[in-house]
Image: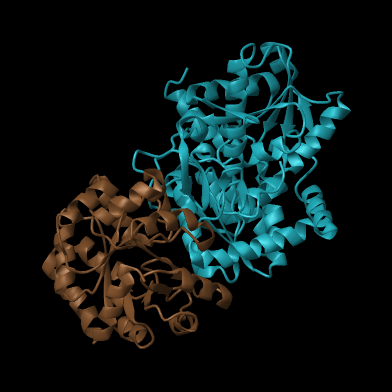
Amino acid sequence: MTELEARLRAVRQRHHAFVPYQMAGASPRWLDHLDALVAAGADAIEVGLPFSDPMMDGPIIQEAALRALRAGTTLETVAHALAARDLGVPLIAMTYYNVLYHRGLERAATVLRDAGISGAIVPDLPLEELEPWREASAAAGLATVLLVAPSTPPERTARLARASQGFVYATARMAVTGRSEGAGDAPRVVAAIRSAVDTPVYVGIGISTPADTAAAARVADGVIVGSALVAAVLANDDPAGLELAASAFRAALS
Amino acid sequence: MGPPDATGRFGDFGGRFVPEALIPACQELEQAFRAAWADPAFHDEFTRVLAEFGGRPTPVTPLERLSTRLGLRIFAKREDLAHTGSHKLNNVVGQALLTRRMGKTRIIAETGAGQHGVATATAAARFGLDCTVFMGEVDTVRQELNVFRMELLGASVVPVRSGSRTLKDAVNEALREWVTCVEDTHYCLGSVMGPHPFPWLVREFQSVIGIEAAAQLRALGVEDPDVVVACVGGGSNAAGVFAGFADGPSRLVGVEARGGSAVTFGAPGVLHGMRSLLLQDDHGQITEAESISAGLDYPGIGPEHAHLAAVGRAEYYPVGDEEVIDALRLLSELEGIIPALETAHAIAWLVREAGQRVPHGATVLVNLSGRGDKDVAQVRQMLREGHD
């Protein structure tokens, strides 16, 4: 069992996990925003590393990535900043494969680990292409979290669930982040995962209100909230405001 | 140019790097294409539609005055004479037939110059499919007449305002849209790029160019041209014409826009579902291609081209915007053919390399991939602003 999974299983003993997302470098105060998320009761944080062509992200996270890149954010600047601060909760990097690939997979995994990151989500890296990164991340002690989609057939769901480390990411909708028009079927996706593994299952994509959070918590072990909280920071670069917004999601889980 | 391996790779390039939500759709498309391509009835219908609707076969024209000027023996494969004015129709007819075969009712597409968007809208009208085209906002301005053409054909055009607002961002947005509607919608990708099986199936649908041209040249007494040359953005017209000659001795040459030359200036990376050569910075961020031609304004190249370059079977060279305008004027004045700006890149390379990389007396087939009507307003503007 990876260190990330052990920590997330311990969280589940207490309550449902609340995992908010922020894009590293989108604001000069992004580290303060991470602190605000911890203060609001985050059990783990998904930290976005910006990529120029985020295929799985809607307009809000695209905008955050653009701001981060304009501010000169790189894998190294993020790692450097995170290494200097202990947030007290597990950090999971979310990025696209080319950012890791271009750096060299072993080096990228080492940089992330040395920054105190314990897992990675790479949405454009499917099971069939996973092996080189899995080797590099495992050598560095990083968990690689895999996504299961509403379109994933049952046999494939079982393979993804078994291969996912830390937790299994169940996408609630056929959509990119921050959009809610795709068909949603979180209960079915979560049930299919649970029939294969007892790893924690978190629901993300399409969780835009505290009410969505409460609904997802009825079937899942935790929820991931991305665009709704990134939008708060894009609109008003204020940690106190972010803490308030995040607290509403946390409260809906209790 | 055979099929890719089981992982969708040509050598080290290709693959299927897409979000999990799109994996089943890519697998379904691969199965549908394998079945269709093995089905004589599919080939019959594909060939019939390309003939009755698309105007195939397109002729091969000896370019006599240009040949005299450059000291070469040049033939042009006239894809500019295909319906909608470029080779793009070949691919969209094939994909529209596949869409129907998969029981889907809607197609989406990305477009740069608008040629693929117009071709997709055309095929959608012909086959009764709903159609949405994603086009970078910058390109909707550069090619506003093509936006109107697509709308006349019943398609809706969505201007893409993310990133560099050009072709690469239109691809991102089409992929994002596809995730939400994959159940009833086919993504009609316009070039030999993207996740497996797109690079393969687009090349197969475009291979009609090279297969026809080889037979037409033989009828003119040319067994194997010394050089086969085509412009390359993603690389579909080049892949299509190369397919007729790759097994022979002809040199294969792809010409990229200098500002979008992934083979000359790029590095291996992963974008838009494929591992290929990409323009990128020191941190793996994709950089913006720059070209006067919206259709070549792409920071990558199809994975099979990256493979052909790596193994040395094809050569790729950049040409600059200035050379392209000169070449466009030269072909217009000497041959009575106004080529698309994209196509003019291939001509520009010939003009530059006649007597250099292409020895005098060589026999050359150039793929005249598209006509220039869409570009004349832009060219007029550039000439007025003091080019030449």
Q: Colour of chain A?
A: brown
* Nearer to us in this view, B372 or B247: B247
What residue lies at 57% left-to-right and 48% top-to-bottom?
B14
Q: Position of residue B38 (x, y in %)?
A: 80, 57
* Nearer to us in this view, A187 or B106: A187
Q: In cyan, which chain?
A: B
The C terminus of chain A is located in which quarter?
A: bottom left
In the rendered view, tell whether residue A225 sits above or below residue B358.
below
Q: Position of residue B12 (x, y in %)?
A: 57, 43
Given the current orientation, which residue lies at the most extreme left position? A240
Q: How many marks?
A: 0
Is residue B210 toward the left or the right of residue A133 in the image? right
Q: Position of residue B250 (x, y in %)?
A: 73, 26
In the rendered view, tell whether residue B164 sits above or below residue A63.
above
Q: Position of residue B84 (x, y in %)?
A: 67, 45
Applied colour scheme: by chain
* Nearer to us in this view, B318 or B61: B318
Is residue B206 toward the left or the right of residue A193 in the image? right
In the rendered view, tell whether residue A80 sits above or below residue B230.
below
Is residue B93 toward the left or the right of residue A96 in the image? right
What residue lies at 76% left-to-right and 43% top-to-bottom?
B208
User: Which quadrant of the view contains residue B85?
Assistant: top right
Note whether residue B285 is visible.
no
What residue lies at 13% left-to-right and 61% top-to-bottom?
A32
The N terminus of chain A is located in which quarter?
A: bottom left
User: Which quadrant of the view contains residue B238?
Assistant: top right
Note whether residue B160 is visible.
yes
